[in-house]
Image: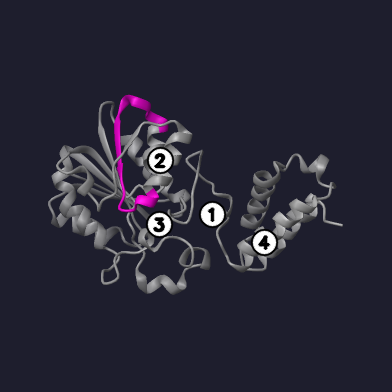
Amino acid sequence: MTITYTEARQEIQTRLTGLGISLAQAQAESDWVLESLWHIGPEALYTTGDDRLSESEWAQLQDFLYQRTVKRIPIQYLLHEAWFYGLKFYVNPYVLIPRPETELLVEKALTLIQPGMRILDVGTGPGTIALALSHQLGQSVSITAVDVSPEALQVARINQKRLNTQVRLLPAGNLFDPVQSEQFDLILSNPPYIDRALQSTLAPEVKDHEPHLALFPPQTEDAYYFYRKLAVEGKAHLNPNGHILMECGAGMGPDISQIFLQHGYTQVHTTRDYAGLDRIITAAV
């Protein structure tokens, strides 16, 4: 005899909180599992919560709990879905899982974008930033997205098809190489910025499963490596009065701002997120 759906929900929560995961996150994940695997939303539990899992559903639950709590694989990879800016994206271990704080980059971009602008997303990953903007703006702007990873671009193509957006996804290449000599009015990037010295402090879900290519700068470089590259190379790809917007980590704002000021950018500004942490750097030419 198997357990009920209500008991399954509680079992997921208990196993997750036992790993030190917050109760709020455990509750959210348990609801997500029931909805995604068995199409049982929180409201449906009032009428079906006492029904028992079938044998195949019980096996599904056991496999999920092993993958999630023993191997510590993120739920987004197990369910192949992640939410960003109100949209559901397909994800797999070739791409970074979208973070809620990155939505601030989209919000900031929307305050600068005017009809007819040409926009470039550098390091698009699953396409979250570029596709979210395209979903909001339609064909009023031209959006191009690039990434060094062919596998990540394949995920972005899947999301483009699912969301029916209009983003030009170029073949894989490093930073600005795919766009050659093209220029844009706005460049966006969420580059790898976690210092490798901090790798051991990260949660297993991050350090053991998310792509290091999207998390960390190259082995011998510091956390500011890609910001220096963006500052140097970005100028050649910005139209007059163009802007570059980048996500950064907590406390990185002053040093990144200095990098861009040293390379002749103006209107350099740091926007903090809702937790009061440095999050978005804006610079203009």
Residue 215 magenta-highlighted: no
Rounded to the nearest whole Å, what is the CA distance between mark 4 and mark 3? Answer: 34 Å
Image quarter hosting the N terminus: bottom right
- Look at label 3 and name its amino acid: Leu
Number of marks drawn: 4
Element under disc 3:
loop
Q: Residue at x 38, y 27 (%)?
A: 138
Dot 3 or dot 1: first in sequence order is: 1
Residue 258 as seen in the image, left or right of residue 156: left
Dot 2 or dot 1: first in sequence order is: 1
For disc 4, the neighbor class at 10 Å (few under 14, some 14 to 19, many from 20) is some
Q: Position of residue 117 (x, y in %)?
A: 25, 31
Q: Nearer the viewer, mark 2 or mark 4?
A: 2
Is disc 2 in contact with disc 4, using a CB cutoff of under 8 Å? Answer: no
Q: Nearer the viewer, mark 4 or mark 3?
A: 4
Is residue 246 or residue 196 the one in the foreground?
A: 196
- The numbered mark at residue 65 is 4
- Look at label 2 and name its amino acid: Arg
- Look at label 1 and name its amino acid: Tyr
Residue range in magenta is: 135-152
Rounded to the nearest whole Å, what is the CA distance between mark 2 and mark 4? Answer: 30 Å
The residue tagged 3 is 277
Is residue 75 or residue 137 the one in the foreground?
A: 75
The residue tagged 1 is 77
The residue tagged 2 is 157
